Image (cartoon, rainbow, N blue to C red):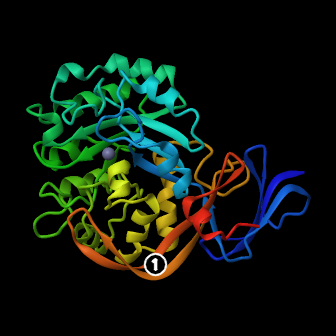
Amino acid sequence: MFDLILRRARLCDEQRVDIAIRDGKIAAVGEVNGPAQQERDLGGRFYVSAGWIDSHVHCYPKSPIYHDEADAIGVAQGVTTVVDAGSTGADHIDDFYQLTRPATTNVRALINISRTGIVTQNELADMAQIDGEAVVQAVKRRPDFIVGLKARMSSSVVGNNGIQPLVRAKAIQQAAGNLPLMVHIGNNPPVLEEIADLLTSGDIITHCFNGKPNRILSPQGELKAAVKNAIARGVKLDIGHGSASFSFEVARQAIAQGILPETISSDIYCRNRLNGPVHSLAHVMSKFFSIGMTLPQVIDCVTHKAAAGLRLTGKGRLSEGYDADLTIFTVKEEARPFVDAEGEQVTGEQHVLPLAVVIAGQWHLTDEGKANHVFDL
Ligand SMILES: [Zn+2]
């Protein structure tokens, strides 16, 4: 007896399959026989992928600047796992953990190398706030919650410290079991070349297609050599759209040179969710259709590539034995504007609309799914 069977689910490669779930895990994919407590027929029309993972969000509710509720940016928007990117450091990470236990959405965190996290905008301006031992102890206390480290390496954050916070971050990473390190890039100093040269395999550059002068492309539009070398060493590019960190122009030029993002993430928090230009992970994903990425490519960036990048074991694939986290969605053809963080507007023709999710085997409607009543069976 299965708990739930989704019948005639449409996959991104246009196969149609049944998906059976038992005890919070995917029990079978293909043609499924056998009874279930609950069945839902997707009629071959609605897409199902592994549950979407947003690799860069802000959802520490007490953060004075960048806060949101996990379920508002998670389950309500078709995202089954959100990874908070450094809102909290060692001082607040336990509070953050406790506050997010009631959430339906899976919540994980990258711990800020600064004890204070993003309580202020310049958390790495005082080197005394970078406490490696406090990070190591936090990771020991919360090994399933803390999946990596975060360092924001832009001028407004590091003050007069230049590249030094990243040198410390790399040492702390070693001491903390070589967890993935996500590095935010923005205005210099430090210049991007200095940052890229320090990164090693598995490290993640977020805000990779930002439009600031310290961007990944040279003034001639070519990928900077230091970034090219970093990618060759296994450094990964993450979108982290946010309020100020995504440029269609940079994305177009990079993608034209074959530089695709490894992960598509939103850098969402309540203000850029409500006022734009982020709105939701689905909205950010849809922007990539208008610059030449395909549906399977976009979905890969929020499922198995996101899971691999942050080592989320058991997540990211629609395969037997994986966690029963799924996103059920449709792709709507409609001309609607997309705006990047630089104010450039393009017309999007295709939009992914999440309708429902399964999280740990349980079915939930998204806001979109509640609004259009498609699953009122
Ligand atoms: Zn962020």
| Residue density around tag 1, few if under 14, some if 14–19, many if 20 or more, within 10 Å | some
* Tag 1 residue: 350
Q: Point out residue 33 in the picture as x, y percentages from the top left corner.
A: 89, 63
Q: Which is more toward the observer, 300 or 356?
A: 356
The part of the image, by quadrant, that contains residue 20 is bottom right
Residue shown at 48% from the left, 68% from the top: 297
Q: Which is more toward the observer, 122 or 103?
A: 103
Compared to 142, does 356 lie above or below? below
The part of the image, by quadrant, that contains residue 32 is bottom right
Compared to 288, does 182 lie above or below? above
| Left or right, residue 149 beside residue 153 | right
Compared to 146, does 187 lie above or below? below
Residue extending farthest to the left is 160
Q: Is residue 233 visible?
A: no
Compared to 252, does 79 lie above or below? above
Which of the four quarters of the rendered structure image does ligand 1 lie in?
Answer: top left
| Left or right, residue 3 beside residue 139 | right
Residue shown at 20% from the left, 52% from the top: 226
| Left or right, residue 362 beside residue 270 | right
Disc 1 secondary structure class: strand
Question: Residue flagged by tag 1: what amino acid is it?
Answer: Gln
Residue shown at 64% from the left, 77% from the top: 14
Q: Point out residue 13 in the picture as x, y percentages from the top left corner.
A: 61, 74
Q: Quadrant of the C terminus?
A: bottom right
Q: Point out residue 107 in the picture as x, y percentages from the top left corner.
A: 52, 39
